[in-house]
Image (spheres, rainbow, N blue to C red):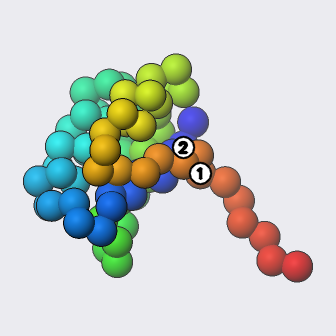
């Protein structure tokens, strides 16, 4: 499943590097890195997403299509 992982505003660049490393170590494949905000999109096993969610410096949400009316 694809997940958007974004870091909280006060998170350091080291926290971003750690989040990416954790995602890769747990079987994730980073698909896109954001440039305007600290974060990335990762293809990650759904049964391991709690590993990412347990990091206090990041927010994880499932990637989804956004539509306008």
Q: Is 2 or 16 nearer to us in this picture?
A: 16
**Residue 44 shows in this picture:** yes
* Residue at (11, 53) in percent of width and height: 14
Visible in this render: residue 40?
no
Residue 5, numbered label = none
Q: Residue furthest top?
A: 47
Q: CA distance from mark 2 to mark 1?
A: 5 Å
Residue 67 lies, with reference to residue 18, above or below; the image says below
- Which element is circle 1 on? loop
**Looking at the image, is mark 2 or mark 1 earlier in the sequence?**
2
Q: Residues within 10 Å of mark 1 (few under 14, many from 20)?
A: some
49 lies left or right of 28: right
Would residue 67 appear left or right of 6 to someone viewing this image?
A: right
Q: Position of residue 51 (x, y in %)?
A: 37, 28
Quarter of the image where the N terminus is located: top right
Q: Residues within 10 Å of mark 2 (few under 14, many from 20)?
A: some
| Quadrant assignment, res 12 | bottom left
Classify the position of the C terminus by image quarter.
bottom right
The residue sitting at 18% across, 51% down in the picture is 15
Residue 32, percent across and down? 39, 57
Residue at point 52% right, 20% down? 47
The kind of secondary structure element at disc 2 is strand
Residue position marked by numbered label 2 in the rendering: 2
Q: Which residue is mark 1?
A: 63
Q: Who is closer to the viewer here, 27 or 56?
A: 56
Residue at (54%, 43%) from the top-left corner?
2
């Amino acid at each position: 499943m694809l997940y958007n992982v974004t870091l909280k505003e006060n998170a350091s660049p080291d926290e971003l590097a750690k989040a990416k490393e954790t995602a890769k170590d747990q079987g994730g494949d980073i698909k896109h890195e954001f440039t305007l905000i600290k974060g990335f999109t990762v293809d990650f096993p759904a049964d391991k997403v709690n590993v990412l969610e347990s990091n206090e410096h990041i927010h994880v949400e499932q990637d989804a299509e956004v539509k306008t009316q």
